[in-house]
Image (cartoon, rainbow, N blue to C red):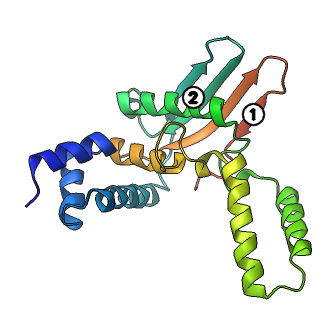
Amino acid sequence: MISLDQIKELRALSGAGVNNVREALEATDGNMEAAIKYLREKGMAKADKRKDKVAANGVLGTYIHANNKVVVVVEVACETDFAAKSPDMIAFANKVALHIAAMSPKYISENDIPVDFLETEKKAMEDELVGKPDEVKEKIISGKMEKIYKDIVLLHQPMFGEDGATVNDALNGVIVKVGEKTLITQFHKYTVSENNVDAVLTNNED
């Protein structure tokens, strides 16, 4: 039997609603780690179901460094003005802005990376692996590409200040909370005496 303390703990960890938390705990026999994974997967399922919806509203998250030399603005889009004004959405947008300031991604999704850049990187990897079996090459290249994604792609990066969860995991968590299609659609990072970084989501079906 699921206890009230378990429900409170999982709610605190995930931010999900009571019914979703209870469902996750029951489905995983009270295993907290498995329940968190269950909620993340449920968030992804919700995102898939809402792909055809239009994210016409949204909120801007901002971060200004204490020295006033770094400013980040990120746009998080959703379906309704009600969701855009919710504390969960506002907190998420500001958290993503802080993450961008700290981790300096260049793109939102891997689909935003220029094709010629990816082809050049893969070609260099293949040249280094000449003579190795195809299945070994594939595994090594896949691992190296994922490292590149974590370095430069926002959604692939571990969320700054959190243990293990990626930005994409956090995004799916917001989808669970607000029940709407939610996208990080663009961000801009301005740093004194450095080139600005501007990223726009090119495929909103991610």
Question: Residue 42: x, y in percent?
Answer: 36, 59
**Which picture quadrant has residue 43?**
bottom left
* Residue indicated by mark 1: 198
Circle nearer the N terminus (1, 2): 2
- Figure quadrant of the N terminus: bottom left
- Figure quadrant of the C terminus: bottom right
Instruction: From this view, report whether residue 169 is shown above or below residue 86.
Output: below
Q: In the rendering, which numbered label is found on residue 9?
A: none
- In the image, taking residue 203 as reference, residue 83 lies left or right, namely left
- x 70%, y 36%: residue: 104
Q: CA distance from mark 1 to mark 2?
A: 15 Å
Question: Residue 73: x, y in percent?
Answer: 62, 25
Q: Nearer the viewer, residue 80 or 37?
A: 37
Question: Residue 17: x, y in percent?
Answer: 24, 45
Give, as a three-letter code, the residue at label 2.
Answer: Leu
Instruction: From this view, report whether residue 129 is shown above or below residue 133.
Output: above
Determine whether the residue tagged by mark 1 lies in a helix, strand or loop: strand
- In the image, taking residue 58 as reference, residue 130 lies left or right, namely right
- x 46%, y 34%: residue: 92
Mark 1 vs 2: CB contact within 8 A: no
Determine whether the residue tagged by mark 2 lies in a helix, strand or loop: helix
Q: Nearer the viewer, residue 111 or 51?
A: 111
Q: Is residue 105 visible?
A: yes
Q: In the rendering, which numbered label is found on residue 98?
A: 2
